[in-house]
Image (tube, grey):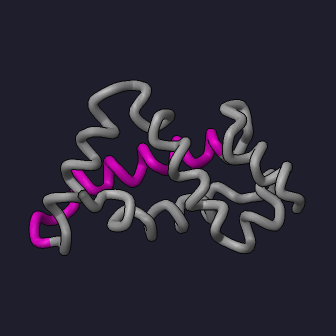
Amino acid sequence: MGYTDIYAAATDEDSTLRKQVAVAIHRAAVDVVNESASTENHSDRLSWARKVLRSASGPTTESGAWTWKVLENATIQANPAAATDNDVQFVINGLVDTMAEK
């Protein structure tokens, strides 16, 4: 995958990957709201999740920065258009602590 293709996947709001990332962010935020308060880093995670869920545009707004992080995954970067929902969700779930840090 060429750099221009990766750039398009990350920046084009109509790209399938950006849409997948937005939905995966929403799902991850809902999961964080429902997780145990004893979860490590829960305070920062919960603050992030509430920010995402407070507005209908929260997941879409967050997807801009998160898509670049998702594209660090070699499998997804190799063919962003072929990324499965499960692959994207797996990567997003693994990034919550990093992206929720203050």
Q: Residue at x 74, y 72 (%)?
A: 75
From the image, which quarter does the C terminus lie in? Answer: bottom left
Q: Residue at x 28, y 61 (%)?
A: 101
x, y percentage for residue 37?
10, 64
* Magenta stretch holds residue 39: no
Q: Is residue 17 left or right of residue 1?
A: left
Q: Relative to residue 6, is residue 56 depicted above or below?
A: above
From the image, which quarter does the N terminus lie in? Answer: bottom right
Residue that extends furthest to the right in the rendered view of this protein: 2
x, y percentage for residue 53?
31, 36
Q: Based on the displayed image, in which of its 4 quarters is residue 36 positioned?
A: bottom left
What segment is highlighted magenta in the picture?
18-38
Q: Based on the displayed image, in which of its 4 quarters is residue 26 positioned?
A: top left
x, y percentage for residue 80?
77, 56
Q: Is residue 65 left or right of residue 14?
A: left
x, y percentage for residue 32?
27, 56
Q: Main secondary structure of the magenta part?
A: helix
Residue that extends furthest to the top in the rendered view of this protein: 56
Q: Is residue 64 left or right of residue 55?
A: right
Q: Relative to residue 74, is residue 95 depicted above or below?
A: above
Q: Relative to residue 40, is residue 44 depicted above or below?
A: above
Q: Residue at x 64, y 42 (%)?
A: 18
* Magenta stretch holds residue 25: yes
